[in-house]
Image (cartoon, coloured by chain):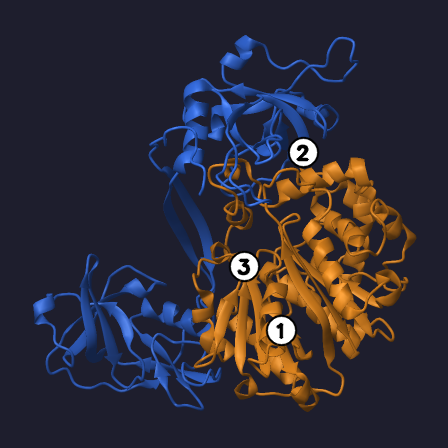
Chain colours: A orange, B blue
Amino acid sequence: MSRHVAIVGVGQTHHARRRTDVSQAGLVREAVDRALADAALSIDEIDSIVVASGPVLFAAVNQPEKWVVDAVGARCKPVVRVTSGGGTGLAGALAGYYQIAGGQAERVLVVAYDKLSEGALQYSISTLYDPFWGREFAVGIMGFSAAYWRARMDVLGHTEEAAAMVAVKNRRNAISNPYAHVKQEVTVEQVMQSKPLAWPIKLLDVPPISDGAAAVVLSCEKLAARSTSRPAWIRGMGYFCEADNAASRSMLVSEPLAIAARRVYRSAGITNPRRQFDVVEVQEPYTCFELSYYESLGLCAPGEAAALIKSGATLPDGDIPVNPSGGCAGANPIGAAGLIRLIEAAAQVMGKAAGIQIPNARLALAQSGGGWANLRGVAVVSA
Amino acid sequence: MLATPDCLPIDLAPLASDLSMPYTLTPGPATGVFLAEIGRRRLVGSKFRTSGRVVVPAQDFCPVSGDSKFDLVEAPHTGTLTGFTETAAGLIALVRIDGTDEDFAHRIVGAGYADLRTGMRVAAVWADGIENSILALAGFAPAPGAPVGTVRPLVDPAKAVASIDYRMDLHYEHAFGPFYGRLFDEIRTNRRIMGVRTPDGEGALLPPREIDDISHRPTGTWVEVGQTGTVRAMSIINLEFVGQKQPPPYIYAEIMLDGASTRLIHTVSGIDMKRAKELVKPGTRVRAVWRDTRTGSLDDISHFEPIPAAPDGGGALTPGPSAAERKSGT
């Protein structure tokens, strides 16, 4: 029987397009200091540390967990680095969750970051393709994502207009998020007319490139009350994968996300996600992803995502708010993005989401993942 | 027991893959001042307030306590050799600068391996004309009897270097193995695209592989797949990025070749790009156009082009280039 695990402290940097005032280690430290302060703990009270960051080619430092040891207080403590594409942040949280649930640690600090201004992003991402088979034609993950969005249009009706509504919603929400750095309202027309980068993906469908870090303090049940009277309890968390070039892969829906959602919903007692969740945070590298997540997460049936965004139900005052933080549209330090989604979901049920608080939020869903459909995870947190 | 491929292994030289990645790295406030000052021939360290430890080059975080509160100090140019080794790049040493608490790794200049002893006194040797780099310090040379220096507060510090240009050149040699070996040898030699049958014999896996991804059973025999196929997904690339192989605009496509049950990533061209959205869609039929050059890679296929619809099909497809145009290697 695994133990209960709570999020007792959260912290993130004020994300930016480029931070030249701090190194990677300094960036990470800001998030760590904020999470520890939020949990009313010192680093001495942390048993174990997980460092989560994107591919080393993003910022040219191999084994960065060694470089940031002093900054994250990991000296003479267990430390592991977790990396899993875009889903790195949530995968890191899962590694910390396992340590406490399995009784190996009482408190774990999970810190996730990327300093994307330092390297060549799309070139770096293109190296995740097979060097023999496809890398020479790869356009980061953008070409691939755009191509299958195009395919989804015909089958699932995920139109350019529907994705533009996601951009309008998330960019407006980001204005109220103190940690976001892109804060500009846009209209559907502006999104539709923005420069095509990998059509159908256009400039305003794309999140910024960001420098940023995020950290959470996870605690066992017994010690949670030392930090806060209102932790976010992790009701379930999972992360699933699929074979990349297996025969007859549909590519139109993310099977790993559907599996992750089904498993985690079962452990969290979720039978009607749209009715039960008070708020949802998803990691949408491009706007088209959010439409797909609506369907895989069971917020609507396949083929109904365009109608769901159009209905306004996912606005902050709708019945199932999605990304009141603005999601990746407000800031996208990739390795941290999944942990930021978890932090935003936790902050909602802890009642400390300030300007973006959904009133009376008690049950929240966070989603994260890497690749177009390959790696997907979800977490359910409750008050 | 695993089935062996029904061909002799193809002995191809490994695929050379060179990555050249540009970076703009941020050293942070402490190391930023160290880099700014080293061209002025000053060695800057951090003195951490709670532990009292002095570290050169200056760091943001204390190696003992993780403390972030420090004062910048100027370290002397002398120290003691604590360790050394000879490498292809010369003599590398650990030097404990006088008054500091951590070793500083750098080169030894003006001495041979046999001249060195741990515990000997050394002094900094400066390079000319180098700024914002640890190489502004050429290294350390033996300095018998050099007086022991002291660490002093840093007076009038230079502004921290905010960003350092850097490039990482990575050279890889990827082994083909028997399956990729035959695939690319067939592409180069016979202009055939070969897959292997799935364990149940339905369709072919491309690229060919030893084990089926889903059933984990050995794959079947080799089979040639078509040079025609169907676009599964497509995107019009206008984005420009570092490392891009061809100038935009072009069409990125995921194509299912006839007879294959997995996808191939390539480009579609030979069309009026202004009408790309209507001419290339999921479901569009395409065929491979080969280059005249034979390198044994997917790039031997110049691109895919739409197959004109049959006269009675009423399709909106334009004809591809003529054979002569194709031969010219578009």
Please state which amino acid type lies under the numbered disc 2: Met
Q: Position of residue A375 (x, y in %)?
A: 63, 54
Please tell me which of labels 1 and 3 falls first in the chain: 3
Mark 2, secondary structure of its residue? strand
Please state which amino acid type lies under the numbered disc 3: Gly
Question: Would residue B242 be found to the left or right of residue B115 on screen?
Answer: right
Q: Residues within 10 Å of mark 2 (few under 14, many from 20)?
A: many
Q: Chain of mark 1?
A: A
- Depth check, mark 1 against mark 2: the one in front is 1
Mark 1, secondary structure of its residue? helix
Residue carrying label 1: A97
- Depth check, mark 1 against mark 3: the one in front is 1
Nearest the camera: B243 or A47? A47
Q: Chain of mark 2?
A: B
User: Picture quarter containing residue A325?
Assistant: bottom right
Q: Quadrant of the N terminus of chain B?
A: top left
Q: Are marks 3 and 2 in contact (CB under 8 Å)?
A: no
Residues at discs 1 and 3 both on one chain: yes
How many angstroms separate mark 1 from mark 2 (CA)?
A: 39 Å
Q: Are marks 1 and 3 in contact (CB under 8 Å)?
A: no
Residue carrying label 3: A54
User: Picture quarter containing residue B75?
Assistant: bottom left
Nearest the camera: B113 or B59? B113
The residue furthest front is B1
On residue A382, which mark appears? Answer: none
On residue B234, which mark appears? Answer: 2
